[in-house]
Image (tube, rainbow, N blue to C red):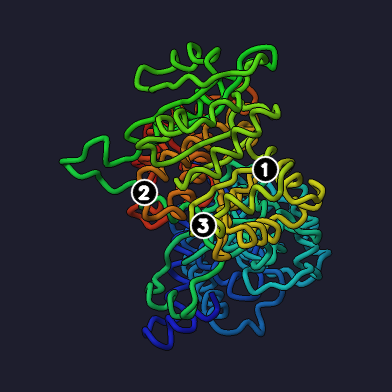
């Protein structure tokens, strides 16, 4: 971002002060939209450019009629560059207001009816600013992306003082104390609380990896401030960045279909899974996978399940085709289904395989899974029990992965426990090194790996990793993974030429559908099928919208029916 800002000014002639003005306008507008009930606002400003953003934001909010208090953490003497300009403009604006509305309040350096400014020279002065804590909104503009931990001095003292306030906090660029390049979910040092975060131009690593807000449904938004796309590209350099955001792939699924399209244009998904008998009844898992594939837009979907489970699965949707597989006495898929006669008919004209949901791990079933994966070349999504079968036979993954199959698209979707079994390390080690583990595994076996969990990762065979920012704890229920498997398979069937983007879009859409469902319900009562009913809204959601805002996390504060219009 430092390179981008410099290029924007030097190569494209856009002064850095204009970028600051655009940033502050975005923050002021967002504050009024996201916190409409806040009539009293306190803005905490540091002495750098992040503080300059805050000073300009304060002036705009005061000009809009809000009652604004500005606390500058440090002396104004010695402010430099754009921050110095922002301070002068703020003071001049307050003096202009004061000509007709001067308020005599000795604890403030400069006061008017709706704009009060006070430089804080020492931590002891904060104790006299209880009025500033009693606000409808606090804007954190203390330190930004150039900050190196830990917080200290007045910035740390202000954080301790802030703990007494019940007001929501809007962070400018990053919650103060958060390092911009952090890829861990949390940091050990002190960090300001945040109920919303607005950054500019492009997200930094912390915006997609770290838990920046108090709740996962609170907004983290990127606003454009005038940096040309050419400046962003030049700052990134000639190499494609190794990290990206899953939401960037949404354009793939939002292009209109050709008018003359037919079902044959959108692939045929084969879902293999389920059990029904003394081994347990798991017919719902492949049924949900098949439903998700149908809802994703796949042209045709066939569910191949043990014969005893067929009636249950067939009843979920009249559009779903089914195929009965010979079952063991316990009701799981039998190895006899590996006969060439069965496999030839079963796989004929199928374009994507989704295998694992509700499957079970009986020896005959494991033999069938191994035989089906090794005897086919079609793209495959492997989940649930099929993953556990792979982890029990490491040599099998060597045989069916992309390296062994000449670039075959093989997608694995483990949760941390399944990932631990696949790698032979502990769950704690997986969670402590999610990015490194996912990236290594995908490259080692030539597969696309979806490591599920908060901030799911999509790691590709070429080393690239996309980070997902949608989803919520209410989705930690049985069936969520089955829907994701079907959604991935359905998009792979429709976009065979762009498998990486198809998987990324599926992961983003899956979490977004869950967020939309929670918007209408509750984390405790949410069912996986509630998310399924929100697929159509997820597909319609546009980010960034016409205002340029890119919603990394959270949703606009409007009824669910209007969310796509809000994003636009």
Sequence-wise, the earlier of marks 2 and 3 is 3
Q: Farthest left residue?
A: 260
Kindly tell me whether residue 103 is visible in this rendering: no
Q: Farthest front residue?
A: 340
Q: Circle 2 sits on which residue?
A: 495
Residue nearest the observer in this picture, 435 or 176? 435
Residue nearest the observer in this picture, 420 or 166? 420
474, above or below 72, in the image: above
Give the numbered dot on residue 439: none
Q: Residue at x 49, y 52 (%)?
A: 409
Residue nearest the observer in this picture, 370 or 265? 370
- x, y percent for residue 427: 79, 46
Residue 317: quadrant of the picture: top left
Sequence-wise, the earlier of marks 2 and 1 is 1
531, above or below 200, in the image: above
- x, y percent for residue 64: 43, 54
Of badges 2 and 1, nearer the viewer stands 1
Q: Is disc 3 placed on a helix, strand or loop?
A: strand
Q: Circle 3 sits on which residue?
A: 245
């Amino acid at each position: 971002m430092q390179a981008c800002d410099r290029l924007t000014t030097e190569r494209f002639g856009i002064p850095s002060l204009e970028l600051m003005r655009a940033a502050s306008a975005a923050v002021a507008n967002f504050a009024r939209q996201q916190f409409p009930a806040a009539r009293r606002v306190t803005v905490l400003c540091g002495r750098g450019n992040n503080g300059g953003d805050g000073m300009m934001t304060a002036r705009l909010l005061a000009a809009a009629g809000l009652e604004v208090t500005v606390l500058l953490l440090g002396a104004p003497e010695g402010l430099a560059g754009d921050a110095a300009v922002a301070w002068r403009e703020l003071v001049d604006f307050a003096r202009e207001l004061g000509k007709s509305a001067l308020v005599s309040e000795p604890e403030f350096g400069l006061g008017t009816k709706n704009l009060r400014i006070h430089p804080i020279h020492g931590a002891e002065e904060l104790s006299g600013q209880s009025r500033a804590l009693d606000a409808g909104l606090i804007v954190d503009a203390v330190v930004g992306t150039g900050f190196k931990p830990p917080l200290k001095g007045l910035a740390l003292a202000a954080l301790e003082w802030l703990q007494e306030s019940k007001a929501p906090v809007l962070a400018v660029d990053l919650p103060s104390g958060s390092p911009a390049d952090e890829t861990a979910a949390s940091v050990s040092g002190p960090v300001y609380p945040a109920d919303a975060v607005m950054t500019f131009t492009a997200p930094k690593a912390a915006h997609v990896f770290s838990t920046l807000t108090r709740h996962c449904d609170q907004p983290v938004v990127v606003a454009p401030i005038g940096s040309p796309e050419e400046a962003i590209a030049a700052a990134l350099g000639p190499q494609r960045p190794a990290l990206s955001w899953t939401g960037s792939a949404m354009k793939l699924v939002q292009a209109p279909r050709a008018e003359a399209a037919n079902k044959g244009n959108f692939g045929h998904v084969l879902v293999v899974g389920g059990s029904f008998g003394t081994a347990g009844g798991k017919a719902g898992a492949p049924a949900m996978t098949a439903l998700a594939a149908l809802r994703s837009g796949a042209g045709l979907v066939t569910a191949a399940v043990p014969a005893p489970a067929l009636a249950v699965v067939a009843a979920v949707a009249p559009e779903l085709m089914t195929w009965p597989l010979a079952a063991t006495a316990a009701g799981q898929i039998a190895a006899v289904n590996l006969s060439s006669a069965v496999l030839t008919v079963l796989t004929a004209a199928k374009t994507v395989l989704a295998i694992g949901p509700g499957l079970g791990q009986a020896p005959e079933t494991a033999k069938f899974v191994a035989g089906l994966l090794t005897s086919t070349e079609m793209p495959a999504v492997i989940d649930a029990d099929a993953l556990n079968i792979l982890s029990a036979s490491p040599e099998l993954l060597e045989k069916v992965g992309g390296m062994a199959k000449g670039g075959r698209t093989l997608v694995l979707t483990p949760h941390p426990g399944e990932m631990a079994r696949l790698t032979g390390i502990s769950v704690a080690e997986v969670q402590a090194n999610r990015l490194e583990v996912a990236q290594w595994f995908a490259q080692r076996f030539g597969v696309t790996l979806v490591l599920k969990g908060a901030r799911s990762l999509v790691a590709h065979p070429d080393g690239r990793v996309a980070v997902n920012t949608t989803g919520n704890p209410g989705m930690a229920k049985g069936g969520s993974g089955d829907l994701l498997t079907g959604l991935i398979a359905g998009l792979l069937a429709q976009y065979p030429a762009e498998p990486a983007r198809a998987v990324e879009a599926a992961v983003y859409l899956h979490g977004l559908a869950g967020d939309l469902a929670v918007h209408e319900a509750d984390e405790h009562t949410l069912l996986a099928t509630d998310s399924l009913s929100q697929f159509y809204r997820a597909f319609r959601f546009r980010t960034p919208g016409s205002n340029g805002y890119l919603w990394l996390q959270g949703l606009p504060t409007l009824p669910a029916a209007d969310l796509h219009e809000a994003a636009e």
